[in-house]
């Protein structure tokens, strides 16, 4: 059998696999990606892309294309709740409440301070072709769809995989040092006996991807997700615009979500699903073209381990989330970002195999939190139902009598109005989960703790508080280079390279970094940043306000922008101190 040798084999061509392919190519590591599917996703599925994901996509050269294709900022400022969509009276479609979502399209200063990139929204059906095209550009002929992994064997030196070319009807072998399982858990994890643990089959859901003109009823252009509480059914449905060329009320395509009980056979019948959707929307005669109806189960599960020998589980192969909060695809991209620089460092001989153990140590706790948060986001919608008093067992008029209390103006309904407003506001746990997206901390041998206490948190979900404590992500700040050009501090971290950031009086640290880089070959850059002095100037004192070390101190940043080490002040022997930290991280 013909055999290909490649350092890294990537199995799976979704968000995780394509991101890994791009990152490895950028790092100069040859890889081969195979996907059993003939094309990228045919389902809209995940669509929210958080700021950190967009930073990674900016690194690999696809962010601008995603922003150009995705939802304009002004069309994704809010999520809102409505009393249905359309119906026989003007009360149908009336807004019940709204919350700002994911930085309010760039209007929230907290999001502006956190990143040079704004949140984006692009359904997976349109995102993945952008990622695939870039992956193919970076690795010609090394991205192969309709090529299925059918067997995998490990030994002390590598992995041998058997691949079936489903177009040609042939088979070939791939010999690699490492295999990244980015296949959603469909194949590799099962072959290796890795179990997914957690809450399964919590709810049966049906999603309808359709083309329809809903502009007459979905009137608020600033609202991205419409949560429809349906008094005539006593149920909730969700309506999300999918573009592709127009957004807001004028979106050509939409996805409609409706839940069914586990023992309800209607969810298995496409004809009944369409009828239920039309009844829920109150649009029985509207021309609708259905592209696809899909069925899925709400679950929150986590792999027992993220590594098996030379195989690493990435993305949905390692964790699956409810869609509430949009953490699934984002976590997958972050997994790949955490792992790929480590694989590259080991393959180049810059780090020992021990570095690879830090992938599970760092990512599993973070994704466990993300899975739990996704579940909590989903369950919290029941608080809104309870506050509204909508009941699936009640008749239509009884449900409407309760909902009308929101706009009755009567004093006796004031507590009801406050209760509903509070319940809706509490869903900021889903739409303002900034500390979940950014406030993670890595704890592993690739982070040198400095003994400082964990900084106090105003809110462990909603409020991201930047820190340079080791294990935290590098905070963003706008700087000026020597030519006066405005650049983000994050962009000073180059692919596959460590960055030492010293204070304005930290020249000894920079000299030490340059000496270590020259003698060891470790990819290490060094800069001084200060308000008045430095290689880069901090004109707004943004970095000064966040750096948490003196003008003589420094931090060491890993290639994935995680703070790996910190010295809050100078030291008599910076070369020895810094060399010891790097040795601990990489060895």
Image (cartoon, rainbow, N blue to C red):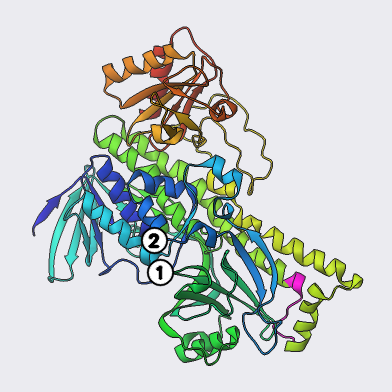
Q: Position of residue 36 (x, y in %)?
A: 26, 66
Name the residue at the top extreme: 572
Disc 1 packing (10 Å; few <14; some 14–19; many ≥20):
some
Question: Which numbered circle lies on residue 501?
Answer: none
Q: Which residue is mark 2?
A: 69
Q: Is residue 304 magenta?
A: no
Look at the numbered disc 1 and give the secondary structure of its residue: loop
Disc 2 packing (10 Å; few <14; some 14–19; many ≥20):
many
Dominant secondary-structure state across the stretch colored magenta: loop
Cα distance in 3D space between marks 1 and 2? 7 Å
Image position of 217 with respect to 311: above or below:
below
Name the residue at the left extreme: 2
188 to the left or right of 54: left
Q: Residue at x 16, y 56 (%)?
A: 141
Image position of 144 with respect to 386: above or below:
above
Q: Pick whichever of labels 1 and 2 is earlier in the sequence.
A: 2
Q: Quadrant of the C terminus?
A: top left
Tell how many labels: 2
Q: Residue at x 80, y 74 (%)?
A: 407
Q: Position of residue 444 (x, y in %)?
A: 47, 35
Decide if residue 439 is in sight here.
no
Image position of 110 with respect to 508: above or below:
below
Q: Residue at x 32, y 63 (%)?
A: 187
Res 324 quadrant in image: bottom right
185 to the left or right of 9: right
Res 584 quadrant in image: top left
Question: Which numbered circle lies on residue 244?
Answer: 1
Q: CB atoms at circles 1 and 2 under 8 Å apart?
A: yes
Image: magenta residue range:
386-395
Image position of 493 with respect to 146: above or below:
above
């Amino acid at each position: 059998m013909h055999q290909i040798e490649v350092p890294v084999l990537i199995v799976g061509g979704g968000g995780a696999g394509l991101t890994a392919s791009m990152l490895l190519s950028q790092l100069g590591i040859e890889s081969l990606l195979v996907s059993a599917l003939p094309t990228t996703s045919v389902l809209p599925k995940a669509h929210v892309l958080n700021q950190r994901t967009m930073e990674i996509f900016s690194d690999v050269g696809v962010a601008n294309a995603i922003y150009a294709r995705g939802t304009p900022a002004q069309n994704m400022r809010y999520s809102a709740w409505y009393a249905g969509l359309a119906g026989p009276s003007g009360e149908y479609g009336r807004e019940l409440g709204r919350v700002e979502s994911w930085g309010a399209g760039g209007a929230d200063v907290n999001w502006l301070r956190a990143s040079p990139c704004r949140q984006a929204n692009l359904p997976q059906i349109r995102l993945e072709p952008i990622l695939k095209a870039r992956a193919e550009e970076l690795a010609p002929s090394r991205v192969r769809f309709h090529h299925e992994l059918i067997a995998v064997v490990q030994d002390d030196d590598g992995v041998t995989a058997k691949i079936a070319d489903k177009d040609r009807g042939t088979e070939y072998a791939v010999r690699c040092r490492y295999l990244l399982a980015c296949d959603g858990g469909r194949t590799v994890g099962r072959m290796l006996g890795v179990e997914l643990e957690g809450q399964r089959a919590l709810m049966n859901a049906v999603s309808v991807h359709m083309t329809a003109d809903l502009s007459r009823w979905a009137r608020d252009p600033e609202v991205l997700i419409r949560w429809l509480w349906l008094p005539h059914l006593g149920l909730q449905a969700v309506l999300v615009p999918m573009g592709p060329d127009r957004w807001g009320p004028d979106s050509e395509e939409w996805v409609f979500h409706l839940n069914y009980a586990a023992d309800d056979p209607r969810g298995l019948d496409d004809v009944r699903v369409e009828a239920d959707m039309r009844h829920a929307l109150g649009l029985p005669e509207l021309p609708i073209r259905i592209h696809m109806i899909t069925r899925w189960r709400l679950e929150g599960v986590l792999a027992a381990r993220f590594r098996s020998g030379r195989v690493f589980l990435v993305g949905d192969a390692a964790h699956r989330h409810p869609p509430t909060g949009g953490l699934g695809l984002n976590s997958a991209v972050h997994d790949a970002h955490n792992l790929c620089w480590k694989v590259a460092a080991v393959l180049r001989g810059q780090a020992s195999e021990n570095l690879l153990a830090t992938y599970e140590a760092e990512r599993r706790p973070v994704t466990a939190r993300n899975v739990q948060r996704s579940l909590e986001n989903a369950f919290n919608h029941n608080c809104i139902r309870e506050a509204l008093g909508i009941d699936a067992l009640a008749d239509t008029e009884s449900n409407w009598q309760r909902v009308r209390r929101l706009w009755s103006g009567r004093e006796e309904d004031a507590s009801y109005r406050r209760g509903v407003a509070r319940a809706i506001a509490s869903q900021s746990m889903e739409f303002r989960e900034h500390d979940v997206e950014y406030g993670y901390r890595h704890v592993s041998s690739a982070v040198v703790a400095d003994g400082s206490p964990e900084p106090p948190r105003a809110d462990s979900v909603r409020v991201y508080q930047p820190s340079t404590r080791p294990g935290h992500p590098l905070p963003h700040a706008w700087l000026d280079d020597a030519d006066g050009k405005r650049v983000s501090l994050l962009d000073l971290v180059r692919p596959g390279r460590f960055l030492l950031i010293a204070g304005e009086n930290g020249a000894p640290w920079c000299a030490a970094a340059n000496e270590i880089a020259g003698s060891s070959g470790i990819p290490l850059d060094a800069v001084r940043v200060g308000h008045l002095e430095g290689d880069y100037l901090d004109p707004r004192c943004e970095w000064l306000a966040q750096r948490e070390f003196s003008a003589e101190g420094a931090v060491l940043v890993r290639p994935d922008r995680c703070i790996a080490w910190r010295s809050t002040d100078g030291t008599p022997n910076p070369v020895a101190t810094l060399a010891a930290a790097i040795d601990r991280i990489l060895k």
